[in-house]
Amino acid sequence: MTARSCAVLVAGGGAAGAAAAIAAARAGAETVLLEREAVLGGIGQLGLFRRICGLYRNDGATAGPPLNDGFPAELAARLGTRPERVGRVWLQPLGAGDFDRLLTPYCAGEPRLTVLRRHAVQTVTVSGASVQSVTALGPDGPVTFAPATVIDASGDGGVAVMAGAEYELAPPGERQLGGFTVRFAGLAGPPGDLALQVPFACARGVAEGALPPLLRFTTFLPGDGPGTGDCKLSALDDADPGGVAQLLGDYLASALPAFRGATVVARSPRVLAREGRRIAGDYRLTADDILAARKFPDGVVRNAWPMESWERERGTVYRYGPDGDCYEIPLRCLTVRGFTNLLCAGRNISVSREALASTRVIGCCLALGAQAGRAAAFRAARGGYPAELRP
């Protein structure tokens, strides 16, 4: 099979992967983006997300400008929505539409970018410290690429692992809870009241034995249209979202008048993991770095989102860095240790478990992807990574 050449190959079309591919193409690199699903957006799309976390500093009377210039700031401006403060953090509402419809026009507008949906990476060949080829299986069979530089934005680090990269992975019983979303329509009454009523009703259902224990962490977010809203559920990775959604809908219909005429109109297709493999890079970001708001000479991304851990016994636990400040993520967290042409972007970069609870949010992943794309394009053109690539 003849391999197709490209300057940059990106595996994974979520927030990080799409941003990486767009940035690489804009930097002049012939780029291919492989996405195993039929849609772009990754967890943001499959999880039915309606707000972007991690674009701004915490606290403050206003959100201020986005922490990272370039594609994350461009995307926030294009949304045309006003940041909303929830507790100590600022969130960017997605507005009408979803991540796939948001990212697809960006990708289509880049002449140097080819997007291949329903293409899953199957094999990776390596020579010495360099990835030589990547083969993906698509609807029309296998296709092999010979890229100058590869970015693994798959979320679970699958491409890097196929190449032989080292990684960290917590035992199943110690990982953060996964999550999924159930969207309802036909709700009656003021939706704002349900933000308090749904968690209380779910906690009561768990106490009565009518609901499984992890549903005590369920939250409710009013929808953009009348009579709509989302229940955000925590679950073990092997849970059945369809069965749990049916159970929850039936219980809420019996417990809350607002749900008696409601129907489930959408849900996540599976439980979406918050924690997976973290690929070993040339630096490992830690909780101490975050809490100290540490800056680095090769810092490429700024982030201020707290370490948001979804724990099995306590639910969501937050740990914040200094008020109004941020930390930086160095390029060395993106460059894969032992390889000359392999980077990671998104949830699978080189961080500790505690640090992952902060770096995994979509706003940060957009910035990580954009910087990985710029670095990859630079390497493809000049044979090495840039000495400086500021946020």
Image (cartoon, helix red, strand yellow):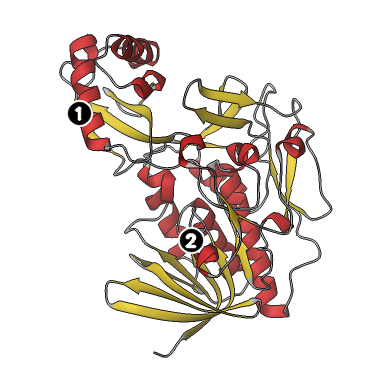
Contact between marks 2 and 1 (CB within 8 A): the answer is no
Looking at the image, residue 47 sits to the left or right of residue 387; the answer is left
Quadrant where the N terminus lies?
Answer: bottom left
Query: Residue 125 appears at what percent x and percent y?
Result: 51, 78
Q: How far across and down, in percent of the image, does residue 43 sit?
A: 42, 46
The answer to whether residue 21 shows anywhere in this view is no
Q: Give the numbered dot on residue 246.
A: 1
Residue lying at the far left in this picture: please name it. 261
Please name the residue shown 27% across and 19% down the image.
211
Please state the horizontal and vertical placement of residue 208, each as a whole percent of the image. Answer: 27, 9
How far is the residue under mark 2 from the one under mark 1?
A: 32 Å
Q: Nearer the viewer, residue 350 or 219?
A: 350
Q: Nearer the viewer, residue 136 or 311?
A: 311
Q: Is residue 330 above or below residue 309?
A: below
Question: Amino acid under label 1?
Answer: Gln
Lower sequence index among marks 2 and 1:
2
The residue that disc 2 covers is: 158
Camera-side residue of 147 and 89 = 147
